[in-house]
Structures are given as C-alpha cells and as structure tokens.
Image: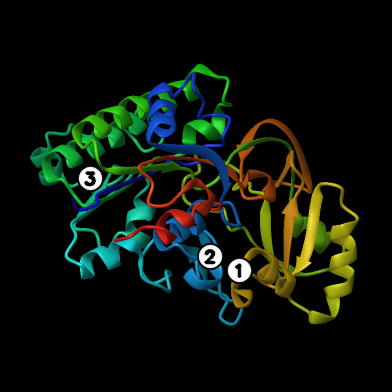
C-alpha cells in the first residue's frame, strides 16, 4: 500500500498546550500507533524559519531562511519574507511533484503559502481564499486570520481535502494569534486544541492508514519586560541596525514586533568590543554571540545574521517600543532559546521514536 502523509504544524504550540485532557484523541492515536514526545524547533524560534526546516528536513544553514524579515546591509533594502525566492533548497512538496504524488498545502497565514506553496497541487489559504476552490470542497468563507475560529476552519478544510481529493501529502498549519494572547490554562487556548483534536480524529477515520505528524513551529512564553536594543545602543554612541527575525505583518499577534532574538549589524566594525560589553551588561539579555559562533552553534547561515546575534532572557523580549524599556503583563511571544521545546505526536511514523529530535526530522525520515 502506498504511504500517505498528513503534517500539521500548530503555530506557537508549546508542549503545555497539547495534553491528554485537551487532546485525548491525539494522545490515544499516538500512544496506540506511534509516540508522543517533546522535541526541538530550529533557532530562531519563528514561523518562516521552522516551516522551511519542517518542509525540507534541513537546518537554516541549508534552507537559507533566517526569519520573517530580511535586511541587505550592502543596499539597505529590508522587507517581509512572504513570497517565493527565499527558500534555497527543494521542499517535500517539490520531491512529491517529481515523483508524481499529489499534494495539498493549507495555511491560515497567507505568507506561508506564498513562501513555500509553489509546488503544491492544491493550495488553500484562509487569508486570501479562492472562492471556486471553497465551493468545490463545500467550504464556507473563512473567518478573519486573527479570529480564533480560523483554526477550526482550516482543520475542516484539511478534512474536506483528505476526504474529497485524497492527496498523498498534506501540510496544514494554523495561526498563533490565540496563543499570543492566552496561556495553556485558559479556555480560549484549550478550545483551539480541542478543535484540532476533533479533526485529527476525523482525518484518521477518513484515512486510517495515513501517517500523521502533529508538531509546532515554535513554543510560546509570557514576557514581562521589553527592551529596545536599537535605542539602548544609540544612546551609548553605537549606531547599528537591529533585524528582528520575528517581525511580520500580523500586528494582532505582536503589537511591538516583540521577539526573543535580534541580528545586529554594526555601522562601524570598530564598535564590536563596546557593543559586546554593553549587551553583556544588560540582565534582560541572555546571551550575545558573534555571528560566526551563532552560525556554528545553531546551524545558521553566517552571512545573513549580522555581526552579532542576541538572545533575550526567558521573561523578556526585544521590541519596537518608545524609549529603552517597557514593563508589561500583556505580552506572550517567542523567538528566543526558551521557545525551542515543541510537541511531536506521530501516528504510524516512518521511523522509531529515537529518530526524531528536531521538527526537521519529520521530513528527513519520510520515505517518499
């Protein structure tokens, strides 16, 4: 029998969200036909980086994707990563196309389809839906991208796609807007997982032998203090450009573009020692690494992560705020080393549990 695959990436799903209480069907399926465990995402813990890894089975040093935002220090050009051309290696979708396998790619965020969906036979996007496609699958118009009900909509679309189109490979992903605002203990967050659990059960019933992998692109944590590194450095006489890999157009998710990692591009190479000393003196900063060391340690392409990489402490984040610091109790975000732990539930996995340490290992171990 030919293998068929379903990969679900729950945007921002820290392990604490996915529990036997919120996802009884998923736990039962994984424990009966596979496994469920905690694995790691790639660094930085942001959406674009980890979709590239999950879809290719490789780290950012090979994919070339280092964030949701880019900066060219030679030209000064900067912008959002939301269209083709940033991914440097083929995806699983491309491999499937070469082998004559039918694929479906379902996203809430439009940018994910724009960057990675080129080789999909079926592309469904809640942000800019194709009305004829919705009609053919019997789907209603989706809610807004930031509406919590969009999770239920994209999962129902995935189920309809499995039932009616029977793709060999299905890739589906949600939006983390809810998790940016609600912790694992809240009813709002629990509802998200309960919707997912219901539809995974239905997808399994519709195609009982399909391999199913449920993971996340990154985790999520509460933050209590934001800092503006650009302002801090400039106030100490160190001009630089701060690239926030988390930065995207979804302001509903992070109003200050707040995230746990920055790539720092110095205007003057002579400021290296002063910058390093300044960053090391700030308690809200977990670590500063020269780009060469960050590339080696976290499998990043050293030519596109600035001169230095800085990581925020667990309850802090870097943000585009007025002034240098902001105290807050309303921010949940990701990007740092502290959001690297994510769940992986596997049903009929291609390989035994010990072969899966990072989310990229899903694709790395597929036998297409």
Are the residues tagged 1 and 3 within 8 Å (C-beta)?
no
Task: Give the residue number, with chain letter if any, for mark 2.
Answer: 59
Label 2 – label 3 distance at C-alpha: 31 Å
| Label 2 crowd (10 A; few <14 / some 14-19 / many >=20) | many
Label 1 – label 2 distance at C-alpha: 7 Å
Which disc number belongs to residue 300?
A: 1
* Dot 1: element: loop
Mark nearer the viewer, 1 or 3:
1
Q: Could you tell which of marks 1 and 3 lies nearer the N-terminus?
A: 3
Task: Give the residue number, with chain letter if any, for mark 3.
Answer: 129
Instruction: Give percent across and percent down for residue 21.
Output: 49, 18
The answer to whether residue 118 is visible is: no
Are the residues tagged 1 and 2 within 8 Å (C-beta)?
yes
Using residue 319 as the reference point, say whether residue 237 is left or right of it. right
Using residue 298 as the reference point, say whether residue 85 is left or right of it. left
Residue nearer the viewer, 247 or 40: 40
Q: Looking at the image, which residue is at 56% across and 35% down?
A: 15
Residue nearer the viewer, 95 or 14: 95
Mark nearer the viewer, 1 or 2:
2
Q: How is the image coloured?
A: rainbow
Using residue 203 as the reference point, say whether residue 115 is left or right of it. right
Quarter that holds the C terminus: bottom left
Total numbered badges shown on the rendered structure: 3
Q: Could you tell which of marks 1 and 2 lies nearer the N-terminus?
A: 2
Q: Could you tell which of marks 2 and 3 lies nearer the N-terminus?
A: 2
Which disc number belongs to residue 55?
A: none
| Label 1 crowd (10 A; few <14 / some 14-19 / many >=20) | many
């Amino acid at each position: 029998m030919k293998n068929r695959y379903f990969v679900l990436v729950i945007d921002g799903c820290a392990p604490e969200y996915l529990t036997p209480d919120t996802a009884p069907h998923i736990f039962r399926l994984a424990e009966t036909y596979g496994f469920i465990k905690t694995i790691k995402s790639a660094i930085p813990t942001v959406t674009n980086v980890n979709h590239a890894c999950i879809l290719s089975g490789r780290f950012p040093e090979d994919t070339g994707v280092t964030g949701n935002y880019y900066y060219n220090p030679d030209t000064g050009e900067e912008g959002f990563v939301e269209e083709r051309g940033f991914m440097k290696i083929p995806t699983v979708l491309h491999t499937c196309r070469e082998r004559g396998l039918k694929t479906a790619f379902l996203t809430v965020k439009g940018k994910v389809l724009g960057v990675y969906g080129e080789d999909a036979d079926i592309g469904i996007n809640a942000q800019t839906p194709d009305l004829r496609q919705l009609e053919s699958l019997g789907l209603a118009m989706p809610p807004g991208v930031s509406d919590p009900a969009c999770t239920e909509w994209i999962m129902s679309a995935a189920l309809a796609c499995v039932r009616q189109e029977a793709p060999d490979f299905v890739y589906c992903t949600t939006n983390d807007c809810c998790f940016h605002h609600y912790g694992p203990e809240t009813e709002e967050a629990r509802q998200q997982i309960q919707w997912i659990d219901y539809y995974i059960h239905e997808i399994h019933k519709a195609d009982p032998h399909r391999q199913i992998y449920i993971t996340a692109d990154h985790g999520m944590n509460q933050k209590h203090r934001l800092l503006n590194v650009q302002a801090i450095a400039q106030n100490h006489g160190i001009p630089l450009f701060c690239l926030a890999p988390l930065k995207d157009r979804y302001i509903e998710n992070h109003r200050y573009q707040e995230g746990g990692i920055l790539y720092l591009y110095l205007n003057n190479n002579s400021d290296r020692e002063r910058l390093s000393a300044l960053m090391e003196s700030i308690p809200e900063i977990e670590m500063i690494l020269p780009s060469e060391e960050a590339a080696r340690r976290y499998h990043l392409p050293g030519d596109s992560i600035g001169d230095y990489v800085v990581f925020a402490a667990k309850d802090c984040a870097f943000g585009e705020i007025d002034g240098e610091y902001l105290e807050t109790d309303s921010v949940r975000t990701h990007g740092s080393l502290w959001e690297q732990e994510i769940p992986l539930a596997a049903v009929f996995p291609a390989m035994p549990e010990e072969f899966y340490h990072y989310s990229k290992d899903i694709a790395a171990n597929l036998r297409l």
